[in-house]
Amino acid sequence: MHIIPFAALLLATAASAAPAAIPWTVSSQSVRAHEDFLAGDALRGRGSATHDEAVTAAYVAAQFEGFGLRPAPGMSDYIQTARVIRTRVASAPTLAIAGKPVAGLRLIVGGAAAVQGPIVVVNSLAALPDTAAVVLFTADVPAFDVWRAVRTKHIGLLIAKDSKTAADWFAQIGGETSMPRYLAETPPAPRPTFATLPAATVDSIKAGADARLSVPIARDETPTSNAIGYLPDTDPKAGVILLSAHLDHLGQTGDGPVMHGANDDASGTTAVLELAQALAAGKPHRRGILFVCYGSEEIGGYGSRYFGAHPPVPLTDIVANIEFEMIGAQDPKLPKGALMMTGFDRSDLGAALQAHGAHVAGDPYPQENFFERSDNYSLALRGVVAHTLSGWAVVPTYHKPTDTIANLDIDYMTSAIQSLIAPVRWLADGSFTPKWTGAGAPKE
């Protein structure tokens, strides 16, 4: 008869009686703690490509290191830095029509330093020309809708009637002209200039009159920072999962209010941090997992663009990207507790996450094209199945001083993040590889 030593018997008995490993639980206290720092007064709204953004990236990087994540392949630390060129209006722009100075110019979007040409008058977005130097748009249409229509054209300058929507938009971008910004390594393509004039002035302008706009421009170079952490794989051929958010916001302009950005996108950054901690605490996964918090999303998605051009792993190895953007409040159009996935029907990723317990649903605002308006898009254009999860994309606090911790639903955030741990583990441990469905893959 084989006799089992007492110590071995005791250990075996204890092991058989031990409960199963307790699943990771996201703490609402931890969620709030991240928010308290990221959206607190000390970071002054984490302005894009500023010192405050760099401090934010350092905080995220330190958290990644503390959780046990490693630097990404080919990186010696947790920060990826790019150079951003920011142009600005150096002094008041001037507009002359038929040789006479025109008052009341509101330059919302700047492009070239000078635009000159005869005025073409149109009254319909469908009638916008594609090659005119100057266009006067006379219809009563929300200013951003006009810009959305004109930004794909080759128009040098579009002038529209000033309106409340134009004033609101101008306020949302900090009361300063939105001027071209670009990565130092990739100068931008030309873009239209968009301005408004008082309605009475617009009504008095005649077609064919010569218009001359002059915009004195200065250029500054500033760094922007991506924070990147990595959980290595157990199967080098299985691919990599990318979980991401942007860590910057609008910051503070002059003596204006601090735009804290508690929802946009401290909430998404918090989600990435919480998932990094949860997934690092478990066993190694078959697939590697990259955790990235991008800089400079608010001024043109430059952090994600730079990452896409300089990925630490080949983009072909990234089997899925889940971006977190504004998950701090529940959209009343969504099922209770759910996050919306932009472009849900473009791939099979959303349905797969749903099937494994993720609180995700389709996008109730397809007309807003949110799929194209977050950091996922630059990678989607490169072939990566990439979507954004959001709580309330049209939340009333969007780009306002009221986007503070006081207006977050911490319990909702905590529950939504918790629901994603098991599905992401499944994705990282399994062989399911998301695919675009139908014509879902976007093109430039």
Image (cartoon, rainbow, N blue to C red):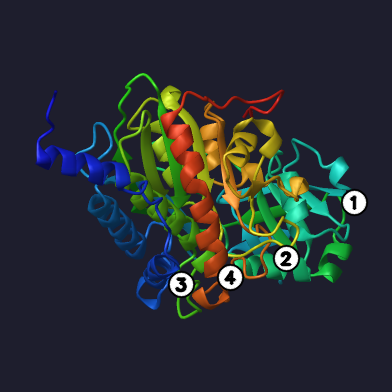
Residue name at image x 33 percent, y 22 percent: 235
Q: Residue furthest top?
A: 237
- According to the image, label 4 marks what residue? 175
Q: Are marks 4 and 3 in contact (CB under 8 Å)?
A: no
Three-letter code, disc 3: Gln
Q: Quick one: label 1 or label 4, which is nearer the N terminus?
A: 1
- According to the image, label 1 marks what residue? 123
- According to the image, label 2 marks what residue? 166
Three-letter code, disc 4: Gly
Q: Nearer the viewer, mark 3 or mark 1?
A: 3
Q: What is the C-alpha distance between the residues marked 3 and 1? A: 37 Å
Residue 271 is situated, as x and y percent measured from the top left of the image, at: 46, 55
Q: What is the C-alpha distance between the residues marked 2 and 1? A: 17 Å
Q: Quick one: label 3 or label 1, which is nearer the N terminus?
A: 1
Residue 131 is situated, as x and y percent measured from the top left of the image, at: 74, 35
Vertical placement of residue 165 versus 193, above or below? below
Instruction: Indicate left or right for 388 with 121 as reference.
Output: left
Q: What is the C-alpha distance between the residues marked 3 and 2? A: 21 Å
Taking depth in this image into account, of 196 and 245 the one nearest to the observer is 245
- Few, some or many C-alpha atoms within 10 Å of disc 4 (few <14, some 14-19, many ≥20)? some
Residue 440 is situated, as x and y percent measured from the top left of the image, at: 68, 28
Q: Nearer the viewer, mark 4 or mark 3?
A: 3
Residue name at image x 25 percent, y 56 percent: 62
Q: Nearer the viewer, mark 3 or mark 2?
A: 3
Taking depth in this image into account, of 188 and 308 the one nearest to the observer is 308
Q: Quick one: label 3 or label 2, which is nearer the N terminus?
A: 2
- According to the image, label 3 marks what residue? 252
Residue name at image x 78 percent, y 69 percent: 163
